[in-house]
Image (cartoon, helix red, strand yellow):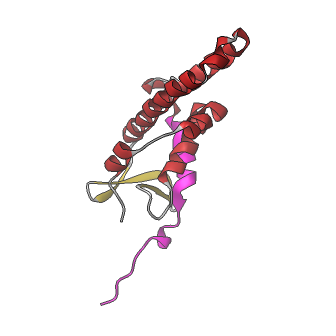
Amino acid sequence: MIIECSDWLKDLILNEDDLKKVLKNGFIKGIVEVVIDKLGDKEESVIRGYEQKKNILYAYDGGIWRELMNKDLVNILSNFQKKIEKEFKKYNLKYADKYAEHSESNELYENIRKVMVSEKFIEESIKKIKPGIYTGVKQKLNNVVEYSVS
């Protein structure tokens, strides 16, 4: 059974591994990878795309599948970003000794730039993020059509 997108997002838990994907790949590529990982199995995913509808995403919410508009995707990604930011705070506390060295402080500042992005940055990056998520979740429409015989 597919859960509602809003419930999935509310219950979503990110961890240090998810943060490391963003730190390694930058916000855009990293968040795409994290979103796709968290969506899991294409057949159970609350966000889907279909080969027949290029670069259009659908979300299951309110008991129906609806097209995921850019503003909806920005809200989802902002939620992810806030959770990544919380993980980043834990990460910095865990590795505080490492960043005490001046030579390592450049890495800290680079990491801050990758994690602490604004909603405006997310809005401007949708054109890069959305196709990445679409590629990760797309499937053939005829693979999900169910036939009933009475």
In the image as oriented, which residue stretches furthest toward the bottom?
Answer: 150
In the image as oriented, which residue stretches furthest toward the right?
Answer: 103
In the image as oriented, which residue stretches furthest toward the top?
Answer: 102
Residue 117 appears in the figure: yes
> In the figure, is residue 69 to the left or right of 136?
left
In magenta, the rendered stretch is 126-150
- Where is residue 28, by image quadrant? top right
Question: Residue 41 placed where, x, y %?
Answer: 50, 60
Q: Residue at horizontal 40%, vertical 54%?
A: 58
Residue 129 drawn in magenta: yes
Between 60 and 116, the residue placed more toward the observer is: 116
Question: Residue 116 placed where, x, y %?
Answer: 51, 23
> In the figure, is residue 29 to the left or right of 59?
right
Q: Residue at horizontal 56%, vertical 36%?
A: 16
Q: Quadrant of the N terminus?
A: bottom left
Residue 116 drawn in magenta: no
Residue 51 appears in the figure: no
Most frequent secondary structure within the magenta stretch: helix
- Where is residue 110, by image quadrant? top right
Question: Residue 6 placed where, x, y %?
Answer: 32, 47
- Where is residue 2, by image quadrant? bottom left
Q: Quadrant of the C terminus?
A: bottom left
Query: In the rendered picture of this protein, how many numbered marks are placed on residues?
Result: 0
> In the figure, is residue 101 to the left or right of 59?
right
Question: Residue 83 placed where, x, y %?
Answer: 44, 33
Between 67 and 41, the residue placed more toward the observer is: 41
